[in-house]
Image: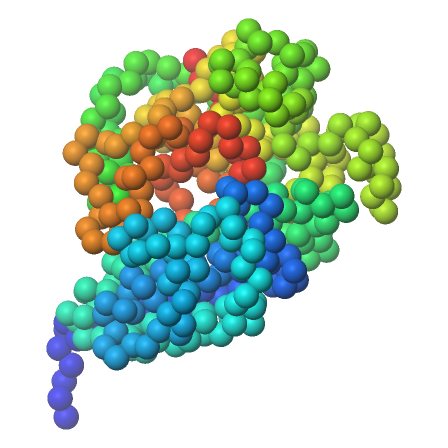
Amino acid sequence: MTTPTPAACAAACDASGLHERFRAVRAHSLALAAPLSPEDQCIQSMPDASPSKWHLAHTTWFFETVLLERHATGYRAFDRRFHYLFNSYYEALGPRHPRPQRGLLTRPSLDEVMAYREHVDAAVESLLASADAAGLAAIEPIVTLGLHHEQQHQELLLTDILHTFSCNPLLPAYRSAAQPALRLATQAPAAQWLAHPGGPVEVGHGGEGFAFDNEGPRHTALVPAFSVQDRLVNCGEFAQFIADGGYRRPELWLSDGWAAVQAQGWQHPAYWLAPDDPRLAQLSSGHGGGWHVFGLHGVRPLEAEAPVSQLSFYEAAAYAEWAGARLPTEFEWEAASALPGMTQLTGHVWQWTRSSYDPYPGFRPLPGVAAEYNGKFMVGQLVLRGGSQATPEGHTRPTYRNFFPPAARWQFTGLRLAR
C-alpha cells in the first residue's frame, strides 16, 4: 500500500474545497434565477443591462473558454456557436454578439442554457477531481477568478431584472415578502461624525486571499485629516433634499449632472414613486399616500431610516453639496473603514466616492485572457466602495473597487458624507 505524500494530501484537500465552492456558487446562480419565468429571463430593458438567461450562459462560457478549452484534455465544446453569443468584451477571444441586442436571443432556449451549464459543470468537476498537485496549482487561480466573476454576475442578474420589472406597469415583485428575504436595510441611528487624523495610509490589497487585479498593488497614499459620517445617508434625509428643491437648483449640481437632470427629467431617485404617481393607484394591493419605493420585493412605503439607493454619482454629489459636505475619496473610505463606530460598510448600497477609476501605481493586469478583465475600463468611471444588499455574501472586502459611469442609477448605489 502506498502512503500519500503530504503534497498529495494537501492537493486533495484543496481540490475538495475548491470543488465545494464551485458547486455552491453555481447553485446560487440557479437559485437567484428560480423565481423568474422563461419570459422574464429573455428580456433586456436597456443596453447596459443583460437578460438573466444571458448571465447564466455567459458565466458558463467563461469556465468553458478560459478554463476547460485550455486545461481539460479532450474537452468538447457544448456548442461552438455559443462562443460568439456569450462572449462579453474579450477581444482576444474573437467577435461577439452586440451587447445592446442580447435581448433578441430567444434561441438558445432557457432549457438549452441549463443543459449548457450542466455540460460545463460536469467537465469542471471532472477536471478538479482528476488534477494532481501541479495541475491543481495551474487551474486554481482560474477557477477562483471564475467564481468571483460569477458572483459579480449574480448581483447584476438582480439589478438587471429589477430594472426590467421597473419598466412593467404592473411593477411585479422579483420575490415576495413571504419568501426568504434578501438582506434588507436595517434602521440607522442619528449620524455621527468620526474623525480620521490623516497622514500616510496603506491602501490596496495586501496579498492575502483573493482580490481582483485592480485592487493592487498595495501602496501608500497621503490623506489629509478628514471626518466621515458613521452611517449612510438615508431616505428620510434625501427626501428633505427633494423637498428643498434639490432637483431644481442648478447651483448644487456638477455641469454634466445638471444636464442629465434636464435631459432625463430626474426628480427623485430611480424607483421612487411620488405620492401622485398613477402607478400606485393601479396596483391591486392598494397603497396609501406618501412616497413609495420599488425594489426586489415590489412596491413598499418609503422607509425613512433605510439607506437611500438607486442614486447616480451626480445625485450623490448634489446631495453632499446641499448638506454642506462632500463625498469621500476612495482612499479616505478605505482608511475610515477601520475606524471604531463605522457602520453600514457593506450589505446595503455601494457607496459613491469622489475618485476616478484609475490604475494604482505599478498596476499590471492579470496575465493571459484575463488581462481584459479590469484595466481596459479605467477611464470615465467613478469608484464605489462597500457592497449592496444584492452582493453575494463573502464577495466584498475593504479594498474592493467597484466602478460605474457617473450617470448610472439602476444599481443599489448610495452615499456616505465626508468633510
Quadrant of the image containing the C terminus: top left
As displayed, is residue 350 above or below residue 17? above
Residue 400 placed where, x, y %?
Answer: 36, 39
Residue 229 placed where, x, y %?
Answer: 48, 21
Which image quarter: residue 135? bottom left
Number of numbered tags placed on the structure image: 0
What is the image's colouring? rainbow
Quadrant of the image containing the N terminus: bottom left
Which image quarter: residue 340? top left
Identify the residue at horizontal 51%, vertical 53% (top origin).
Answer: 102
Residue 266 placed where, x, y %?
Answer: 64, 24
Q: Is residue 147 visible?
A: no
In the drawing, does residue 45 fall left or right of residue 344?
Answer: right
Residue 79 placed where, x, y %?
Answer: 41, 72
Judge by depth and name the residue closer to the eye, 109 or 193. 109
Identify the residue at horizontal 58%, vertical 33% (top origin).
Answer: 310
Judge by depth and name the residue closer to the eye, 419 or 102. 102
In the drawing, does residue 324 fall left or right of residue 171?
Answer: left
As displayed, is residue 75 above or below residue 184? below
Identify the residue at horizontal 34%, vertical 67% (top origin).
Answer: 64
Which image quarter: residue 305? top right
Which residue, as the protein is rendered here, is positioned at the far bottom?
1
Judge by depth and name the residue closer to the eye, 5 or 43. 43
As displayed, is residue 104 above or below residue 47? below
In the drawing, does residue 137 fall left or right of residue 86?
Answer: left
Q: Is residue 288 visible?
A: yes
